[in-house]
Image: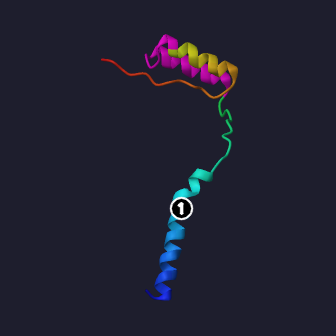
Amino acid sequence: MTTAKTAGLLAAVILTGGLTGCAMFNKGTLNYTRTTTIGKELIDLKDAREKGALTDDEYKKVKKDILEGGPIKAEPTAVTK
């Protein structure tokens, strides 16, 4: 193998290894910023419950999360027909 081919192969291996492993060192913090008012979120939540998009239990949990001011932690539920 020639020196140029060896250098090219080595560069390709380093580049590939660097691209595939870069996510494992990406340690950051997720910041949550509310972009709507709590009142608007509660109105939208009530509308969703009235239209049948949420069960009463889901409504209560999400409403509690909204009133606490943090991100909403609703778990999706299976739809049965």
Residue wearing tag 1: 19
Looking at the image, residue 50 sits to the left or right of residue 24; the answer is: left
Mark 1 nearby-residue class (10 Å; few <14, some 14–19, many ≥20): few
Res 65 quadrant in image? top right
In the image, the segment drawn in magenta is 37-57
Taking the spot 66% from the left edge, 34% from the top edge, the residue there is: 35
Image quadrant where one finds the N terminus: bottom left
Image quadrant where one finds the C terminus: top left
Whether the magenta-drawn stretch holds residue 61 is answered as no
Q: Is residue 29 above or below residue 58?
A: below
Q: Position of residue 53 (x, y in %)?
A: 44, 20
Q: Position of residue 7 (x, y in %)?
A: 52, 81
Q: Residue furthest left?
A: 81
Taking the spot 48% from the left edge, 82% from the top edge, the residue there is: 6
Q: Position of residue 3 (x, y in %)?
A: 50, 87
**Tag 1: residue type?**
Leu
Query: What secondary structure prevails in the magenta region?
Result: helix
Q: Position of residue 77 (x, y in %)?
A: 43, 22
